[in-house]
Amino acid sequence: MALNLNKNLKLYYSIREVAKMFGVNESTLRYWEQEFPYLKPKTSGPSKIRQYQERDIEQIRLIHNLVKVRGFKLAAAKKIINSNRDGADRKAEVLTRLIDIRDDLQTLKRQMDFLE
């Protein structure tokens, strides 16, 4: 069996790690958990430490795309997600891919400029 280097080996992420991924405050994530009922990270222990899984991070990516990137208010983001869940997911995925491609192209341009 071949080793899959692209597979993410981490199962759980802390609230601090997830907040850093998206450039938001931890309090923003806690607020989104209250506003979007399907965003429920696993909690453990008596202190209720949040443990985000990949599915939670995908939900946050969708919310982040609608609220922070595209500028929708929370009520509008909820409406979009509830009315067209698949379309909103696909748009968020496409936007993420385009941002990654842009970053790769900018890195390539810097490398080419360095060689000149």
Image (spheres, grey):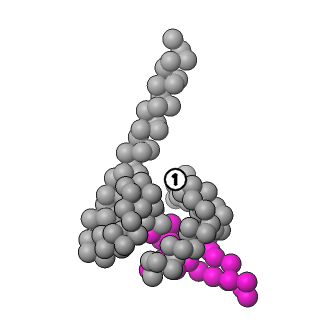
Q: Which amino acid type corresponds to the residue marked 1 in the rendered image?
A: Asn
**Horizontal arrangement in the rendering, residue 93 relative to residue 44 (left or right):** left
Q: Residue at the far top: name it.
A: 116
Examine the rendered structure and indicate whether residue 108 appears above or below residue 116: below
Which residue range is magenta in the image? Answer: 38-59
Residue 51 magenta-highlighted: yes
Say which residue label 1 marks. Answer: 6
The structure residue drawn at horizontal position 51% and vertical position 80%, both measured from the top left corner, is: 34
Query: How far across and how far down the image is residue 98, in percent?
Result: 37, 45
Residue 77 magenta-highlighted: no
Examine the rendered structure and indicate whether residue 106 appears above or below residue 66: above
Asked where in the image residue 63 lies, by quadrant, the reply is bottom left
**Crowd rating for badge 1 (residues with CA inside 10 Å; few <14, some 14–19, many 20+):** few
Query: How far across and how far down the image is residue 88, in percent?
Result: 31, 64
Q: Residue at the far bottom: name it.
A: 46
Q: How many labels does the image show?
A: 1
Q: Does residue 10 appear anywhere in the picture?
A: no
